[in-house]
Image (cartoon, rainbow, N blue to C red):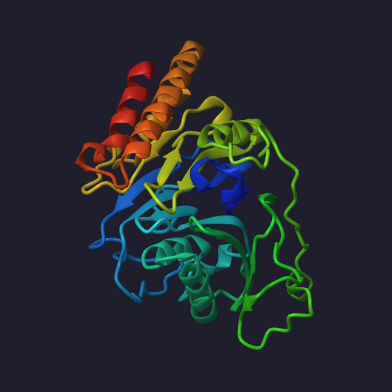
Amino acid sequence: MSFNGDCFVVLPANCVDGSLIIGRNAEDPESLGVSSEVCFYDVSEVLEGKTDGGASAEATGDALRVILQKPQPGLWGGDFGANERGVAVGLTWTAGEKEAKDSDSLLGTDIVRLTVAVAVDVDAAVDRIGDLVASHGYDTSKLNFIVCDSSAAWSVSCAGKVWAAEKLEASFLRLPSGGLVVTTGFSKSSEGLEAASSFAAAHDAEAQTPAEEWSGPKPAGDGSYTQHDMFETLRAASQATSSRAANVSVLSGKGISCHWFTGTPNAAESVFKPFVFAPKPRISPLTQVQAEAELTLLHKLHSQRKPAALEHLRSLEKSCVDELNNYFSLQDHASEELDELLKDCVEAEVKFYR
């Protein structure tokens, strides 16, 4: 079992309204026919159930509401998650976890869910990942996470029960999927870890350095980069033979954060649908695999689409972006009128496929 994500991070100085924008293409050529699910969890259920690695889901603070993307049906955790406090966590690379399943450990997917379930800011999220790895990391596992809130982004690399974290300083970065990202520049780590040594080299993994190599619209450094630019970045970076579901989070420090999901493979052939933490969110069952089914209904109908549908849906996507940006410019919190935002957008998309 491995989960990879090609991630793009644009820090606030580049973005409209000083938001931080992160985009992620899930990558796995062996799982293109497998549905990714999008699931919402309220505080009463976010820590319930059995983890993918078998360890208990222990609480360490007040639970938060969570939106979670699952790379395959039946998983407890996810490859990307965000919470109502504007914290987002994604897996960028995993290795060596196949043997860990059903042991008394935590997989990377578990750590994503357990982190966004309680972390109130990016620093708490980094520390939470470190604590979970130290207590329940599997000996052969190697993991990379991207961890963000509206103020900062961190990369966290883990090997077994050891971890190191580096704050991202470049104004925009592309984080590769494959190899440990953190090398010698870490400022948080397992107790006693030597800062002078290369974390990646010390744990027998090829080092992957974040780079300014970009796809699609490139941040210009003038505060003009938008979520639509990130949509196009992910579309330009997607590959028909390996790209699965994509997601974008616009993390706002002074307003409403918004999370966008395709729920279908290959961003170049998909549209993004928005979710916000309104008072009582309801998402569509079409983004979840139902009993005795193999695909989400959204995925199934998307795979049967007519080519003309995509052009109409892109127009709807742009209208949705414009309408929400106007709403966000006038409101500093999400009201009940946005409770069914993702549900409505998914069901509008499906109408074009029937």
Q: Say which residue appears at 51% left-offset and 74% top-offset.
A: 127
Q: Quadrant of residue 347?
A: top left
Q: Quadrant of residue 179?
A: bottom right
324 vs 72, nearest the viewer = 324
Query: Looking at the image, which is closer to me, 334 or 93?
Result: 334
Residues 177 and 86: in front is: 86
Q: Is residue 152 left or right of residue 257?
A: right
Residue 161: x and y in percent read 59, 78
- Identify the residue shown where x is 74% and y is 47%: 212
Q: Residue at x 34, y 44 (%)?
A: 276
Outermost residue toward the top in this view:
308
Determine whether 33 is above or below 320 in the image: below
Q: Residue furthest bottom?
A: 192
Up the image or down, 216 lies above or below 194; here it is: above
Residue at x-position 42% and y-position 58%: 77
Residue 286, above or below 301: below
Q: Left of 317 or right of it: where is 140? A: right
Question: Taking 133 as reference, is 176 above or below it?
Answer: above
> From the image, which quarter does the C terminus lie in?
top left
- Say if residue 236 shows up in the picture: yes
Percent coordinates x, y for residue 39 in the rendering: 34, 48
In the image, residue 137 lies at what x, y percent? 54, 75
Count of numbered circles on the image:
0
Measured from the top left, where is residue 16 in percent x and y? Answer: 52, 40
Q: Is residue 300 visible?
A: no
